[in-house]
Amino acid sequence: MAKISTEKLNLWYGDFQALLDVNASFEPNRITAIIGPSGCGKSTMLRVFNRMNDLIEGVKTSGKVLVDGINILDSNADLVKLRKEVGMVFQRPNPFPLSIYENIVFGERVHSENVKKDKLDEIVEMSLKSVLLWDELKDRLKESALSLSLEQRQRLCIARLIAVKSDVLLMDEPCSTLDPQATAKIEELMRELKNNYTIIIVTHNMQQAARVSDDTGFMLLGELVEFGKTDQIFTAPKDKRTEDYITGRYG
Amino acid sequence: MRKIKEFIIEKLILICGIASIFFVVLIFLFLLKEGLSVFNIVSPFNFLFGKSWYPISEPPQLGILPLILGSLLVTLGAAIISIPIGVGCAVYIAEVAPGKIKEILKAGIELLAAIPSVVLGFIGMVTLVPLVKNIFHLPTGLTALSGSIMLAFMAMPTIVSIAEDALYSIPKTYKEGALALGATHWQTIWRVMLPAASSGILAAIMLGIGRVIGETMAVMMITGNAAVIPQSILAPVRTLTATIAAEMGEAVVGSEHYFALFAVGIVLFFISFIINVTADLFLHKKQ
């Protein structure tokens, strides 16, 4: 069963329609890439999945977004629970200006009533191990997270989501501020994590989409033009617009 | 021709720049020159920690401890009142208030800053002083507490506007990150925004306190001006600033009293200086 699916999803910023009847479904344990030129609505769509668009004034939506079968666009949807399950990694790594340790246990502190020190320590070790930072950072946990390199910061942000036991990782151009080497490492991490997560990555780097993803969706002007297996999209696109984009006619 | 014009303008601006430093140095030197001679009569220790201030008795007793404690007590009271309200107000304006209310509040805060302190003192004298007197059943409402409350109003605009700036300049990504992890609005403010803005908020508090400690007119009108070591916040006190303002007019130029008042000025100068430098350190730490 699909982890996340959308039915006739429309979204407006004021009078501007940014998403147009999007129907898509995202399978667990796979990496789905959303590609398309800037302004096509790919980030907007990602931000619907954890309702981050609520922060912007004048956003209206229609249609359905089902996460585990529950429509999260309902006005009485539990946003705290949703955001705990559907975590987001941002374009610019955004660790809080706190210690590395406090960054990782932030979720636990926010979500549970009484926190025990051993439990927190356990969470920190487990999360940092999953993003392969434990060996590098285990002696520096009290240092500010802002002392880390960009790549380490982005890993830390992923660790923060692992710590709250998210099921879904939404990644909004997670490598756009990283150099090629760091990008390769993050991609490797994504492949490792996909066994336990549903990963959706927005990228305007087609090579990246081709490298890491299992499924790919191509968006243009708010419309999901084509959605399918990555191999098929990149080798035998069905839609002329997809082909034009992939072969570099525009974008 | 053009070159000469550039040259002259450049030098003129340079003079303007130097002038401000020059005046500060001049004021400081003048203070030192006038104030230091008091130490021919009393030792610096007895001056700072002497318990009685009777400048016109014979021989004069020039201990400013009651004045220092008066200033500290009033300032402390004002800080206790204005810091929570000021920071709370800043958080509300920066984070919670919807557009229109935000504008009204900001305008209100600016207006509060624009009220001359003598007017605030006057209003305090006719409204606050009787109120304090009646609530606590005191012989007089002219107390440190009245001064603290009034000064809290004066510190508020500084604290609110600088703290609000600090909160506003935190990268939006921190807030997004916290919300995306499922934190509530309040948890985001408390656990991420306030720590991130802490140095700016501390600077705001220091500058607010700096304003309070240097304030003269309002405290002179409503604190009772008794130069004794205050036993409680409900007793009249006299601050360093009020002492200078009240006594300078009647001190004989060149007398011990006159020099002592300048020395009080030096003490004030140092207190303000330390507070401003601390505030500056916090502000720079932020960047």
Image (cartoon, rainbow, N blue to C red):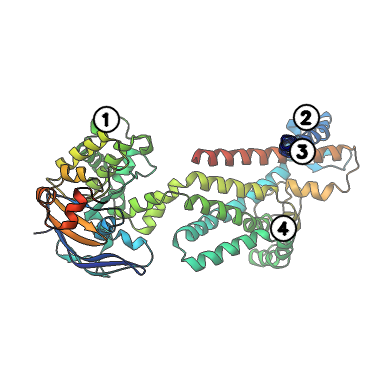
Please, what is the three-letter code of the amino acid marked with disc 4?
A: Ser
Residue B23 got which mark?
A: 3
Query: Where, by quadrant of the figure, is residue B51 drawn?
Result: top right
Using the rendered image, report if marks 2 and 3 lie on a common chain.
Answer: yes
- The relative height of residue B106 versus residue B280 in the rendered view (above or below) is below
The nearer-to-camera label among 4 and 3 is 3
Using the rendered image, report if marks 2 and 1 lie on a common chain.
Answer: no
Q: Nearer the viewer, residue A6 or A250?
A: A250
Q: Nearer the viewer, residue B36 or A204?
A: A204
Q: Mark 2 and mark 3: span between their CA atoms? A: 29 Å
Q: Mark 2 and mark 1: span between their CA atoms? A: 60 Å
Q: Are marks 4 and 1 in contact (CB under 8 Å)?
A: no
Q: Nearer the viewer, residue A144 or A71?
A: A71
Can residue B60 be seen from the camera position used here?
no
- State the residue position of label 4: B117
How would you rate the neighbour count of disc 4 (Cα within 10 Å): few for under 14, some for 14-19, many for 20 or more? some
First along the sequence among labels 2 and 4: 2
Please, what is the three-letter code of the amino acid marked with disc 2?
A: Ser
Q: Nearer the viewer, residue B257 or A105?
A: A105
Residue at point 48% right, 46% down?
Answer: B198
Can residue A65 be seen from the camera position used here?
yes
- The relative height of residue A129 versus residue B190 in the rendered view (above or below) is above
Residue B43 got which mark?
A: 2
